[in-house]
Image (cartoon, grey):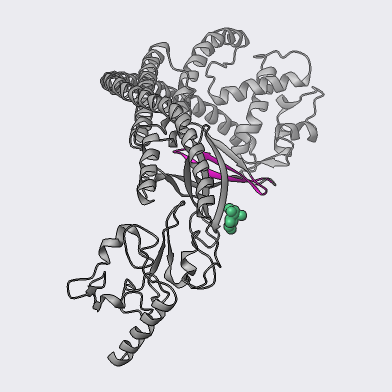
Amino acid sequence: MLPSKKSAQIMCTLLFTFTTTSLWASSLADVPRPRGVSLSKATLYKPRSDDSWLCLDGSKTLKFVQINDDYCDCADGSDEPGTAACAEGTFHCANRGHRPQDVPSSRVNDGICDCCDGSDEYLAEGMCANTCIELGKVEQEQRKSQAEIYKKGAAKRTEMVERGKQLKAEREKRRTELDARRQEQESLKAEKELLKKQAEAAETEAINFFKEQQKEMDDVAAANAPIVDDSFRTEATASFMRYDLNKDGYIEISELQQDLQLDRDRNGVISEEEARYFLDERERIDLEAFITLSWPRIKTMQMIAQGLFTPPEGEEHNDEVSELLNEEQRGDQKAEEDHVQDQQFEGDEEEEEEEVYEDEDIGAGSVEAEKSPEVEYDPDTQHFINMANEARNALSEIERAVREIEHEIKEIDDQNAKDYGPNDEYATLEGECYNFEEREYVYKLCPFERASQQPRSGGSEITLGRWDQWLHEGENKYGKQKYAHGASCWNGPQRSVVVVLKCALDSRITGVSEPNRCEYYFDFETPAACDEEAFAAAEQRFKDEL
Ligand code: MAN
């Protein structure tokens, strides 16, 4: 703007000033200052000796009379505290009798009463009634009852402080105890580890020895088996050769019909049916099948025919004898020709079998040992295994004890890392949970742990956040808590909660809101927030401002 134009504007403004209303606020306060300037800033609005004035941001020097000339000169809007000329400016309402207030200067003379003293609408005299005294009284009452609550709550808070300190001391004591116990258990663990190592070495040695013995026994059994098999095979093969009259490598019905020893019903003829019995109901049989299927039956008949064996009555007895011979084939070497010997053999076998049973059991055990723990060891080996098991158990018990101690230490360390307020007054809230029911959800806050939301219609609980930190804002460093990293919002951020704390006689949630999707606010009252000193300081600041 050209200087001439600016001068003309100043003239107009001054004229307007003198004819309508003063842009000076001397009538409103003891200290004369331009309209819209707070008492605390009054000294900044003094003319220099040459009647000039520097914008508060230092950007420009003006004539002092240019202040509140309804023309914005300073970048920070500081030259127009009492008009709406500057977009950046603020208008200060003194609001005597109530609390002073700063409103954006755009609201000055806009036809809406913003200040309770009506000072923002000074051009429309009488439009805004001064309600400050009234409001002041109401607020005064509120402050009085607030002071009462603080007073009573402070007593509860003192208890909470004491309990918080006590909890801290208990934690420290427990931590020291746990450290000592951990050391103790660690050295015990080292001892048990050594014992386990020794016991396991002895166990391995014993099991290896046991296995070697088993192997030796298996080897002996294996060495003996072929002798028996071989003699059985040799005898059967020789017999096969004798029966195979046409030398075609098969024994047929007609070939067996030549041997009268096979006349089972002793009628002097070997019927096809009789012959087929010895061929395992087949037409013909080769050498291998003959050895395993025919020979045990044929040999039985031969023994009967030669009077070497007297079967009890009935065919099935022949089968029993065949079975006996089959056993022979499996290695029962004492199934000899003589029936008496046979009986003798049976008696011996019982003894032998007992031994073999034990041996077999151990043998089978050693094979089993590879597969399952249910091996039956001999008492000596089992003793070493038991000792090793005991040593292993003793070590796992110590290891479990150490883990438990470490877990508890971690819990204590986690708690020690938390800030329970300036005097540990919030510590007692940990471990408690508070619910708040609204139309759709039941909200839950477990201080210093977690906040959640459960739909009332059913459905699973949603974590809104886990303990994160205090939001130290302004004078009140312990006014808000943040719970972060909750369940992710659909196509959005992780849920989080800000808990706004207020002094009251009981701890409870008084309201929940979700101003932005998945960002929640909990209003939480607690005596822990009844810091009388902080309240008194706030009161003093308020009074100072008045
Ligand atoms: C759930 C609740 C609401 C949230 C939506 C977002 O319904 O957690 O609070 O706004 O998810 O999708």
Q: Tell me if residue 459 can be seen.
A: yes
The N terminus is located in which quarter?
bottom left
Q: Examine the rendered structure and indicate whether residue 160 appears above or below residue 443.
A: above
The residue at the far right in this view is 267
Q: Examine the rendered structure and indicate whether residue 259 appears above or below residue 512.
A: above
Residue closest to the eye, 342 or 347: 347
Ligand 1 position by quadrant: bottom right
Residue closest to the eye, 380 or 7: 7
Image coordinates of residue 478 in percent, x first then y, are 39, 42
> Looking at the image, how many numbered discs can be counted on the residues?
0
Indicate left or right for 132 with 379 as reference: right
Residue closest to the eye, 139 or 525: 139
Question: Range of the magenta residues?
Answer: 438-456
Magenta stretch: dominant SS?
strand
The answer to which quarter of the image holds residue 265 is top right
Indicate left or right for 259 with 77 as reference: right
The residue at the far front in this view is 19
The answer to which quarter of the image holds residue 533 is top left
Residue closest to the eye, 486 or 430: 430
Q: Examine the rendered structure and indicate whether residue 446 appears above or below residue 210.
A: below
Image coordinates of residue 224 in percent, x first then y, are 44, 23
Image coordinates of residue 460 in percent, x first then y, are 62, 45
Q: Residue at 72% x, 14% y: name it.
A: 311
Indicate left or right for 255 with 155 as reference: right
